[in-house]
Image: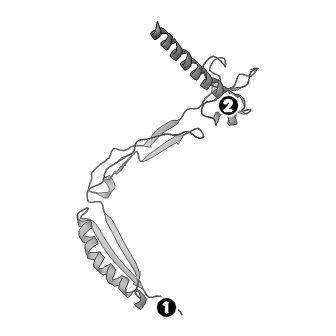
Amino acid sequence: RPKFVITLIIAVSCLKFTTGQSSSSSKICEGKLTCRECIQTSTCGWCTEPNFQKPRCHVPDGNYCPGKLTVDPRNEFHETVAKNLSKAKSAEEIVQIYPQKAQLKLRLGEVYKMDVKYSQAEDYPVDLYYLMDLSESMRDDKETLSQLGVELSREMSKITSNFRLGFGSFVEKKL
């Protein structure tokens, strides 16, 4: 007998909780007066029935609006360019991220999680170009850069054998 009473209390509480949620959602929807305003709320749909007498904005449940006349847009995700990842060595064949291009339509305030895959290509070409002011005031920076250049070159050789380092200079003078 006590188990039955506890089960009954839990069932009534759950029913009251879910009914409360539904009515608060429907009140949010009923306050929307245009289709645009209605479908910007993620829990609402708009009834397009021409002679509809109730509030058009409602929580879509299949029974409120006749037929399939409820506008209730869902999130849409389409991969428009989706080449497989590659570990190619020539620049033309390298695909490092998947998908390469996607189209996503969301309702206002909606969150959408999508998976993105990444693969580092082998011997991917890297060009690094330094442009530096060689005036006397920059002497210490020039020395630091020349020391770092050797270390950077060594570290980059661990990642790719296709690494080029360039250097350019200028002297800033008033004319």
- Image point (53%, 15%), residue name: 9
Return the mark for residue 11: none
Disc nearer the start of the sequence (1/2): 2
Where residue 142 appears, x then y in whole percent?
Answer: 35, 83
Judge left or right: residue 76 versus residue 47.
left
Amino acid marked by disc 1:
Lys
| Residue 165 locus on image (x, y percent) | 31, 73
- Is 110 placed above or below 89 here? above
Residue 135 in sight from this viewpoint: no
Seen from the viewer's position, the closer of residues 21 and 124 is: 21
Mark linked to residue 173? 1
Quadrant location of residue 40? top right
**Local crowd at mark 1 within 10 Å, few (<14), some, or many (≥20)?**
few
Coloring applied to the structure: one colour
Residue 134 shows in this picture: yes
**Who's the residue at 47% across and 88% down the image?**
172
Q: Indicate the position of residue 4 as horizontal and vertical percent values.
A: 47, 9
In the image: residue 93, left or right of residue 17:
left
Q: Label 2 belongs to which residue? A: 28
Eyeballing the image, is 91 above or below 155?
above
At label 2, which amino acid type do we have? Ile
Q: Secondary structure at mark 2?
A: helix
Q: What residue is shown at x 39% (from left), y 83% (from top)?
A: 169
Residue at far top of view: 1
Give the farthest residue toward the bottom: 175
